[in-house]
Amino acid sequence: MALTEITQRANNRGGARQTTLFDSLGAAQRRHKRTRKAPGQENAHGENSPPDEAEQAAKRARTRDTAVTDAQPQVTLVTRPFTMLGVHAALRQRQRQALAPHSVAAGARLAALVSPAARAFRVAGDGAGALPLACKYGGAARLALVDEAGFVSVFDTRRGGALAPVQRWRAHDNAVFDIEWCGDGAQAVTASADETCRLWDVERELCLGTFAGHAQTVRAVSWRHGDAHCFASASRDGAIMAWDVRCNRTVAADGARAFRPVNVIARAHPAAAVPRARRPVAGASVTAVRHLRHNPCLLASAGSASEAVRFWDVRMRVASRASALPQPVAASLLPPAARRARGTSSLALDPDATRLYAACNDSAVYVHSALAPARPLARLAAPEFECRSFNVGTAMSPCGRHLAAGSSTGSVVVWELDRFGTNASGRRAVLQGHAKEAGCVAWNPDSTRLELATCGDDGILRVWHEDALLAESASRDPVNRCSWGFSRLACSPPAP
């Protein structure tokens, strides 16, 4: 239709305003725009065809991507002045935020630890009461207990009902101070006050050999990690001896085998020197010995002379002169606040083999580096923890998050540890179930279970396990509070 004809028809309709040629042209263009298609969408006859489905999908994808891009928030960078105070505050805040969820969950688990009356065993030797001196787990189910009467008792902690030994035999004619399981759990070595160590086949209760060489009570033993042939012993005579079941062996006519040490470190922790003394410096008692994992030839030891921890290489031969003192390959320095030497009771190594925990007689546990010993990295203390003897033990949980320590007050303190091996949160659990000093503690090596064994001078062995419902219901019963063991949480403000 021609534009003049369109204009004429519009004017014939009448109205106040006359339609011009430009008005008609704009109306025709608008109608044509509504019916126009994109170029290239005409068929062979010149008619418009519907758009392809692939092109429609691509168009929808471009529209969606544009909408998502437009919806993203704008990031604004804020710069602050660099100050050392701000750096330290940020590090402390980041540590608290990273550890807060873990600490809350760990605290709830520790609060659920309970020891019913059925999971307590009173030690008796030869019909009379005997004090338990050490307990160690040999696998996820077997727990070995040694006492001052010379007996070894093996318990199966997974059995229900009352706690009772499944094996019991007399290992020495004197008190047994320590027991250490071999790696596979088939054998164990005991340390006794009869100045000897003995290797046992636990299943058959058979002595496989006697290790003689010390002049006084043998206080502690430690197997080399990943080795079922070598172990070390520490004695009150001040000597550390290394043993190997493959050599230095003599067989008697009755078939009994006796072993001699392959290396002797005499006076490993010398006592305080006396000025102008003619006699050589005597060696103080070696109270603890522990093999290190990053180097199987290194071991750490502690004594009653000071809080220092010494590191030895068992391959090195010490000087043969009587006046010469052995030189360790490394040694930790005394704590800065130590006014006088008080001695160390026990040592515990964390699962990562990077930190060593030493319980000292100044009622504190010092954290040492097992890789580069120097001054203590941290100090753990609590009002409930007192260490007034050399029989207080420590143990690290298999997960590395909890450190348990006995106490002369009868309580057992379990500290929560952060990823740095310290107690930055100040939270701890206090286990109350012994009437006298709690000397030995041991964790179940099964990391899926939270199980702890403790024994004290009251002659009772307790096994603690996690059960929140049982702990809550039993704590309300006054009868159970007299015979059960319960846990309570305590918190101290973190160190600045």
Image (cartoon, rainbow, N blue to C red):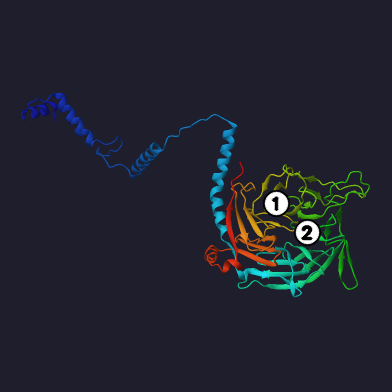
Q: Is residue 26 above or below residue 356?
A: above
Give the image quarter of residue 486.
bottom right
Q: Is residue 181 visible?
A: no
Q: Residue at x 87, y 66 (%)?
A: 258
Q: Earlier in the sequence, mark 2 or mark 1?
A: 2
Estimate how packed mark 1 is, as few (under 14), some (14 to 19) or many (20 or more) residues with alpha carbons within 10 Å.
many
Q: Residue at x 56, y 51 (%)?
A: 103
Depth check: 25 or 140 in front? 140
Query: Element under label 1?
Result: loop
State the image coordinates of residue 17 (x, y, percent, origin top left): 9, 25
Distance between mark 2 and mark 1 Cα atoms = 21 Å
State the image coordinates of residue 357 (x, y, percent, origin top left): 70, 51
Depth check: 351 or 167 in front? 167
Image disc number at residue 443: none
Relative side of 477 to 294, left or right: left
Q: Is residue 240 above or below residue 43?
A: below
Q: Amino acid at mark 2?
A: Ala
Depth check: 171 or 184 in front? 171
Q: Residue at x 61, y 46 (%)?
A: 424
Query: Element under label 2?
Result: strand
Quadrant in the picture for the C terminus: top right
Q: Amino acid at mark 1?
A: Ser
Q: Is residue 200 above or below residue 369?
A: below
- From the image, tell me which residue sits under label 1: 363
Give the image quarter of residue 81.
top right
- From the image, tell me which residue sits under label 2: 220
